[in-house]
Amino acid sequence: MPRINSTDELKKLRQKILSLRDPNKPCISICAGAGCIASGAGEVIVAFNAEIEKQGLKTDVDTKGTGCPGFCERGPIVVIYPEEICYLQVTPEDVPEIVSQTIKEKKVIDRLLYVDQSTGEKAIHESDIPFYKNQERNIIGSNIKIDPKSIEDYLAIGGYAALAKALSGMTAEQVLGEVKKANLRGRGGGGFPAGSKWEGSRNAPEKIKYVIVNADEGDPGAFMDRALLEGNPHSVLEGLIIGAYAIGSHEGYVYVRQEYPLAVENVNIAIKQAEEYGLLGKNILGSGFDFTVKVHQGAGAFVCGESTALMTALEGRAGEPRPKYVRSNVVGLWGRPSVLNNVETWANVPLIINKGADWFTQFGTESSKGTKIFSLVGKITNTGLVEVPMGITLRDIIYKIGGGIPGGKRFKAVQTGGPSGGCIPEELLDLPVGFDELTKAGSMMGSGGMIVMDEDTCMVDVARYFLDFLTDESCGKCVPCREGMRQMLKILTNITQGKGKEGDIELLEELSETAREAALCALGKSSPNPFLSTLKYFRDEYEAHIKEKRCPALSCKELIAYHIDPEKCQACMSCFRKCPSEAIVGGKNLIHIIDQEKCTKCGTCFEVCPPRFRAVTKISGEPVPPPIPEEARTIVRESKQK
Amino acid sequence: MSEIILQIDGKEVKAKEGMTLLEVARSAGISIPTLCYHEKLEPFGACRLCIVEVESRGSTRLVVSCVYPAEKNIIVKTRSEKVDRIRKMILELQLAHAPDAFDLQELAKEYGADRGRFEKEPSFCIHCGLCVRYCAEVKKKNAVGFVDRGIRKEINFIPEIASKECWNCKECFPLCPTEALQAAYVLVQALAFPSQPASEE
């Protein structure tokens, strides 16, 4: 492919690509994102290609492995164009039918459609599914339309038009001005205004400047950046090039965690393609602007998501945050001005340039503009990625889009902002989602992880879990973080094991203050948040654990016991057979009893006890009733007597 | 170099641009406790003991003085209820690892730190990094370094370098505030080059 030397040539190339594509030609798009691949999308793609060949349709139908559209709960997802029929949970066995029915006969296969659980209505198109309908998918919406490994696909949907617009029609100051006007705030955690960060770098006297993509996404349960980099790497690159132009940088880096092999692969392919097309390198689109990008793989440290630690790691040293009080946009990588933005922040840039700041600011709240992608996970019906306008309430995200809590359970809290974020309780569900709103509630936006918890979740254990994660990920440089968390984790672990003492809460609060005030970096400073926010809203749970040795959520193993209600047990043998530690005494027509000495509290009996009996219960904070005498255990069945 | 005037503990002091608050304070005879600071080494900012209160433009915040640059007109307080409380906690956290270290005991007295507040976990090393940094920055040998991260982080000699460099140097020994370094060194000596007694060279 010859390089594109001007914006005119780019336009002509786009027209040529489009002219060679028949919009009415059927195209089967199969999500090839990490989630769908894990649920078998790879096999589905192979099956489609084989079936199409077999049915002699090779020239009549296109197939495409695409980026992730977000509805991971129902993957593998298949969308068939031009009708945009959306099939969910497609298996290789469904493929022959899809090809012969939908492709050949133009018939919709009902059983593969989305069914609304409450109304029973079926949705044919993606846009009819409530999960999608209530979203505003400005960024992630393109994922299903493109093969992330094809620059032509990206060009076909208008890719690199923003870059052309910036380079040919706007000065660097104008680009910067537009981003500032859009009030784009960093999507990676802190929510710092990207425009101000850029401006600081632009105005720094040092000539050599860098732009960096932070793709070191490491929050448990978060995969927004992963989906973007895997699914639409060119959009991130385009944003980066535009940013570099605005700042006056000629060198960029993509710092991507090595645990994302597909993202690494796709972004490398995208860079290579962009170089071949002249969208990276010397004299981009004939504008005289030069820019190159390199990919750097992270070595598995969460703290490297912190800007100064990331830059230290990029320099080839151990990834530890820098203690100096200087901004990295002025003194950053190799001591030079460096703008580091998160994947999603960069992906927003082409949209802002293409459609303008006014378009962008129509979404969102006063202080948080645009949309935000969240990964909705945990105890939620529709697990997946959702893109919503800022200002939407947590309730709408969890219930309208997420479909609520499965299994008829009650919502308890939603954890936002990753490990350093906090838990938001039910009474704050109507909180509009925005940077400042979440911070005020004691949590934060973070990069957009949202872990939904139901009544079975113990909030003390949640705090312990996140502290455990952070303790493991601390770089270990400063005392308040390394030693403070070591002690906090010990205390929290003790509390969940029934070894909590009077004064533990106060000591945890004191350790929290030391970390908040004295830790070196954001990871350390925010490390007490999981504890502080759960204490704020669920203090009673802490007190129950410490004072009554009781876990109100019946979750902490050391504080609960399993018990079979002799009134309800029908001696069905289910738990008797399934118990892995042979802790159940009983037999045919003999009421089952749990031998507490042998019980390992794995919960198997609780799960297998038929719902019509519900004989197995969990007990916490009170003694287990003594087993009924042996002579009373025999069940005499009336029906059999007759 | 332009001169900066600021206030530390109610005293007006002069500083040169680029100086840290710790340097300014010490040059004015005001003491701030430190564990990881050494005048020959780049500030490390790890022990956080040198934390002070800085008031500028009406707002007060806590900063660590070994890395915070002197700014004009700021008001610095090297002691306050909060500063002392944090220093006490930092010392108590460190004392769990090196309860008998003289430097820590001295400071513990000053700040009322209880060396038994946290369960003892004697590792001796308090990760001040003086040995590691001295070897890297002054001696340029990198014979000793940190390994692993977080609560598993520890110092270790690199046998290949240590066997060549350390016998005649040992300048890091007296820097160690807890004498942990000697212990680690002896360990490596025992493990890595048993056939090379110290008297050989």
Image (cartoon, rainbow, N blue to C red):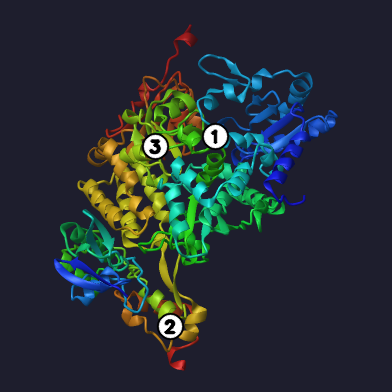
- Residue A418 position (above or below residue A321): above
The chain ID associated with circle 3 is: A
The residue type indicated by label 3 comes to Gly
Residue corresponding to mark 2? B139
Residue corresponding to mark 3? A434
The answer to whether A549 appears left or right of A278 in the picture is left
C-alpha distance separating marks 2 and 1: 56 Å
From the image, state whether disc 2 or disc 3 is nearer to you: 3
Q: Nearer the viewer, residue B180 or A54?
A: A54
* Residue A273 visible in the displayed image: yes
Residue A266 location in percent, x, y?
65, 48
Q: Nearer the viewer, residue A143 or A331?
A: A331
Instruction: Give SS at disc 3.
Output: loop
The residue type indicated by label 1 comes to Asn
Asked if marks 3 and 1 fall on the same chain, the answer is yes
Q: Are marks 2 and 3 in contact (CB under 8 Å)?
A: no
Q: Nearer the viewer, residue A446 or A455?
A: A446
The disc label shown at residue B185, or none: none
Question: Which numbered disc, 3 or 1, marks the residue that appears first in the sequence?
Answer: 1
The chain ID associated with circle 1 is: A
The chain ID associated with circle 2 is: B
Residue occupying the point 63% across, 42% down: A161
Q: Quadrant of the N terminus of chain B?
A: bottom left
The answer to whether A30 appears left or right of A53 in the picture is left
Q: Are marks 2 and 1 in contact (CB under 8 Å)?
A: no
The disc label shown at residue A138, or none: 1
The residue type indicated by label 2 comes to Lys
> Crowdedness of circle 3 by 10 Å Cα count: few (<14), some, many (20+)?
many
The answer to whether A486 appears left or right of A133 in the picture is left
C-alpha distance separating marks 2 and 3: 51 Å
